[in-house]
Amino acid sequence: MIDAKRKASGSNGDAASYYASQVGASSGPVGGSLVKRQRQDEGDDGAGALVAISSDRQGKDKGLMRSVKRTSSLQAPIVSLNGAHGAEILDVAFSPDGAYIAAASADRTISIWTTYGDNTNIGILTGHSKAVTSLTWSKVAPAHTPVLFSGSADGTLIVWEVLSGTKVRRLRGHKGIVNCVASTRSFPQLLVSGADDGIVLIWFWQEESRPREAIQVGYPVTAVEFSEDGSQVYVAGLDNDVHIYDLTQKSILYTLRGHTDTVLSISLSPQGTHLASSSSDGSIRIWDVRPFAPEPLPGQKGNARLQKTLQGLSIGFEQALVRCRWNKSGSRLAAGGGDRTATVWDVEKAEILYKLPGHRGTCTAVDFHPKEPIIVSASFDQQLLLGGECS
């Protein structure tokens, strides 16, 4: 463990393109160590509100700023977590208990932050040789020993024991950039990853460093997710569709069609009944993935599993893998965007509730806190923004 504390500093200007960051960043230490760093104190004017941009029902910004009552237990309405990275942040996620935040960067490192108190940057995980493109926490690991999984442009995944900075295992099997990784809610040993090599790999990460099973997709895979019980894998990529694979039957059960451009991310609802897919076509679609064929909605044409279409997803010229996530109740969805904001939708009404400004580059990823009304966003501007949800 290397103790190299320093004051964090902000970043200025937009970052380079997402593709350039994927093929290898030159900064950042390598070696599997945990480098402790300290975030600079952010100013707190003592205000009890945060700021959001109102939107009309068609998802168009009115450009009006409004104050919203703060509902979380954070010390400030909004906090900038910066200074830990020297390149774009590509993914962010709260730990299952909400105590920590992990951020993946093109500088080849992962920063770990505390959610509460002074929002301390408790360490940097190093070990990948190229951009860290995606991450996910183990959903079943004990809270006192949180486990994190990361995927990288170096073609590998790493299993981390976060608080000690220990690199538990490196997983090798892909021959291209790893774009996505997901863990199960039911089985602690299962992990799935997808890559530019057109292959989805299933891992028993506690036992082996090589994949247990491979699914040949045939085109770059951008998003993967497990079903609630872990028996199915949802796979999306450059063919604009989401395919549901049955791991027991080793075949495709059905396909969700409707997007007209690349699917960028997929996210399973907290109840395990619906899947959200964000796409370069500017929409997020909500699909019923329960194990039955639902009746089509009145007047509906096409896939009967399509329940809602959320419009207004902003896609920048970088064509980043803009990720969407559900809140804890399943009533809201959030996603980043090329307009430098985090957008939050009301799922039932299929309307934009608000946009959270503050980033100076494409907002690549967002996540909702698992217990409190708190949201975090990541961006090409090398910072995280942490704040309370708008009521």
Image (spheres, helix red, strand yellow):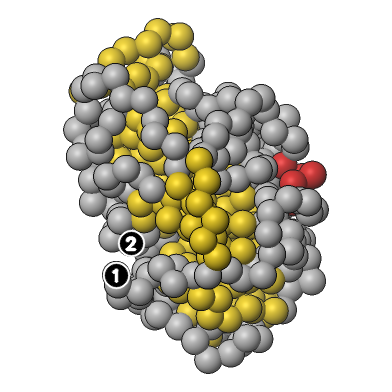
User: Residue 34: x and y, percent?
Assistant: 53, 65
Count of residue discs = 2
Relative vertical location of residue 208 with respect to residue 134 in this rendering, above or below: below
Near-viewer residue (153 or 351):
153
**For this view, does 76 lie left or right of residue 11?**
left
Relative vertical location of residue 202 with respect to residue 323 in this rendering, above or below: below
Tell me if mark 2 has few (under 14), some (14-19) or many (20+) residues whose alpha carbon lies within 10 angstroms of its own.
Answer: many
User: Residue 59: x and y, percent?
Assistant: 46, 21
Q: Residue furthest bottom?
A: 207
Relative vertical location of residue 216 with respect to residue 368 in this rendering, above or below: below
3D distance between C-alphas at marks 1 and 2: 8 Å
Marks 1 and 2: CB-CB under 8 Å? Answer: yes
Camera-side mark, 1 or 2: 1
Give the amino acid at mark 2.
Pro
- Residue bearing the label numbered 2: 96
User: Residue 155: x and y, percent?
Assistant: 73, 68
Give the amino acid at mark 1.
Ala
Residue at the spot 70% in from the left edge and 38% down from the top edge: 319
Label 2's element? Answer: loop
Question: Split into 4 quadrants, where in the image is the C terminus?
Answer: top left
Quarter residue 64 falls in: top left
- Residue bearing the label numbered 1: 143
Residue at the spot 39% in from the left edge and 80% down from the top edge: 187
**For this view, does 209 lie left or right of residue 327?**
right
Label 1's element? Answer: loop
